[in-house]
Each structure stands twice: as structure tokens, then as C-alpha cells.
Amino acid sequence: MRTPLIDRRDFLKAAGSGFIAAMAPSAWAATLNADAIFATAYMRRDGSYGAAVLSEAGKVLHTVNLPDRGHDVTFDPVSKRSVVFARQPGTFAVVFDHTGRQKPQTIASIAGRHFFGHGVFSKDGKLLYATENDFENAAGMVGVYDAGHGFRRIGEFPTYGVGPHELLLLGDGKTLAIANGGIETHPDFDRAELNLATMKPSYVLADRLTGDLIEKHELAPDLHKLSIRHMATDESGAVWFGCQHRGPVTERPLLVGRAERGRELKLIDMPEKVLNGFRNYIGSVAANPQAGTVAVSSPQGNVFVVMDAKTGGIIASNDMVEVCGLAPDGPDFIASTGMGVIAEPGGRSVSEPDYVWDNHMLRIG
């Protein structure tokens, strides 16, 4: 049974930063650790952008202003810092302390590159890796940043594909899993997709230290318009991925797959009703190792689905308008929507109508 919600979080928010600053660091840390903490990007109804830290009850605890729309957030448990990345073709990432004690820091992309909205820290917190676009050469890159020295960019290596999106650090601490969406873009054309007829999505494993290619897997030729975008790792170490179909709307390809090292990609068969409900678009993927489940969302289909991580069988399908962000929460998942709602299936729901929550949600732990 989950620990009951603690009202002191809302009290802290109302008390303001002066109260927080007056607390002993150990007391503040204990308060933050009492419940789950989540982070997500947002847009406000006035058109401003930011990233928010949320309580398990869905209450806003802390916000960080952003110059434009953010996408995903990654967290370093060593330094206790998070980084929110601009949505493509954005040229910034913002480092912030979720307690609000430290001043945010902006990372600017170098000339000829832009961010794709995702990144990940090394296990020791020393390096930050970000998916980037070498847009003049239509080549995916991983930018490498020195987190111990002001997030100075110290190198890059290829993603061995076009249009990289999410990347994960696997359990060995050395291997990066990279989802190459296969779609060529250029900031001169905003988010226009320039190569749909020839796109080649791929799933890549690369050595984060050398940049060497370990494995590369492509979907079957007749699925070349099935863009691989988002991923999560289950309790067995397998990587689940979600796709977005760029072919005719009348086609209904499988959209969720499972990747294991040394094996071909496996797309998961689903009941026709569930597959049709996604409307050819998976917006987010999350795994819950405690429960042995994986969840995928579709803001186009207004639904998120929970699956058994061992069998791929459907456990639950949940209707929710503009749902996209997902994160594990106890035995369940917590979800966010573009309507400003934070909710659990069949459980509590909190609405922040001034906020449009963005595509992803991160559990900070």
C-alpha cells in the first residue's frame, strides 16, 4: 500500500523559497525523499515555457523558466541535478537543481547542431550525452558534455542513423541504446520532414566511451516509415520502444517493440481495437520494474496502455484526453496530459488548468 500523501508539500510551496532556504539541508532532503518526485516540461496558457518539479499528488513544487518549449528531462542521482532539453530543433538545454537551491545553467548547442530533446548521464554523473542533429550533413550525433566542468562540450560520435531521438544508458553502464527515427529535418524548415520516401529508422547500440558501433537493427523494408522514437528498459534489461508511423493513415502497423542484445527487433502483436486506438502514434514509453509492466501512451488516440513486460499482453487500457507523459509510481503509472491533468488510472486526479504538460515525465529518485 502506498504511503498516504503528506500535506506538508503544499505547505512548503505556499511558504516560499525563504522558508526552504531556512531549512537545514538534511531536513529539506528528508522532505523531498518522503514521497515520489517527478519532473516534466510545460507550456503555460500565457505562452511561457518551463520545467516543473511535481509531488506525487501532482502539485507543483518548483518551476524553472525556459526560453522555448522543452521536451524530456534526465536526472543525475550523484549531483542531484536534472537537465531539461529543448524540443527539436531547439538549441538549448537547462541544468537545474530540483530543490531550487542552485541557479539554473543553460547549455547551448554548438554551430551546426541542434538538440533532439533527450539525453542521459553516465552512472558516475561525470558525463552527459545528448542526441543532436548535424543538420547540414543529415547525420545523427551524440554530443558529450563534461558535467564536472560547467557542461563543456568535449566531443561527439555518430548515432549511425538519421534523426536520433531518445537514448538510454543500459545496465552495464557502458552501452547506449539509441532510437534513430530515420527522419531528416533542417532548422531552416522548422519541423518539416524532408525524406519520408527514403527514411530508414534504426535501433543502435553504441559504446559511450569509444563511440564505436556495437549493433544496428533496422525494421523490415516495408516498415521503413515506422519511426522509432521513445524507449524504456524493463526489469530484465530488455528495451521497449514505441514508434510513430509516417505512412498512409489507412495502414495499421504494429507500433510497440522489444529489443534484446544480439537478437532481431520484435514488434508486439496487439488486439486490433487497441492498435487502432493509438492512431499510428506512440508518444511515450515507461517501464515499472516493481510491477513488471510497461506502459505506452498516445496523445492522438487519447489513451495509454499497460502491458505485461514478460508476455507483451495487455493488462489495461486507459482513456485520457491528450495523455502522453508517463512515469512509474508504486505498482502503477502516473500520467500527464496536455489538458493540465496529472492522474493515475482509477485513482486520484489533479488538474492544473494553467499548465499544458509536455510529452514526458521523469521520476526523480
Image (cartoon, rainbow, N blue to C red):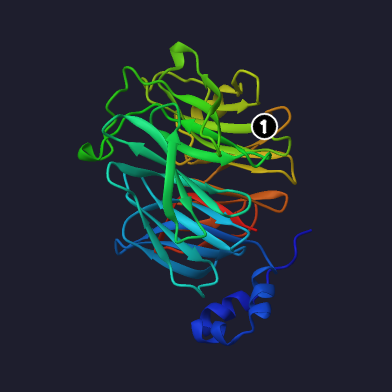
Q: Is residue 59 visible?
A: yes
Q: How many marks?
A: 1
Q: Is residue 130 above or below residue 26?
A: above
- Name the image quarter holding the C terminus: bottom right
Toward the right, the furthest residue is 1
179 or 319: nearer the viewer: 179
Which secondary structure lies at badge 1? loop
Q: Is residue 297 visible?
A: no
Toward the left, the furthest residue is 188
Specify the quadrant of the image occupied by residue 260: top right
Q: Is residue 333 above or below residue 246?
A: below
306 or 143: nearer the viewer: 143
Q: Position of residue 145 (x, y in %)?
A: 46, 50
In the rendered structure, which amino acid carries the disc numbered 1?
Answer: Ala
Measuring 47% from the left and 20% from the top, which residue is drawn there? 252
Measuring 49% from the left and 73% from the top, which residue is drawn there? 102
55 or 119: nearer the viewer: 119
| Residue 163 shown left or right of residue 365 in the figure | left
Toward the top, the furthest residue is 221
Q: Position of residue 314 (x, y in %)?
A: 66, 31
Measuring 53% from the left and 84% from the top, which residue is drawn there? 15
Residue, disc 1: 238
- Name the image quarter holding the N terminus: bottom right
| Residue 124 shown left or right of residue 279 in the figure | right
Q: Is residue 161 above or below residue 79?
A: above
Q: Position of residue 132 (x, y in %)?
A: 39, 40
Query: Dot 1: within a 10 Å radius of its alpha carbon, few (fewer than 14), some, or many (20 or more) residues?
Result: some
Measuring 43% from the left and 67% from the top, which residue is drawn there? 104
64 or 120: nearer the viewer: 120
Q: Position of residue 312 (x, y in %)?
A: 67, 28
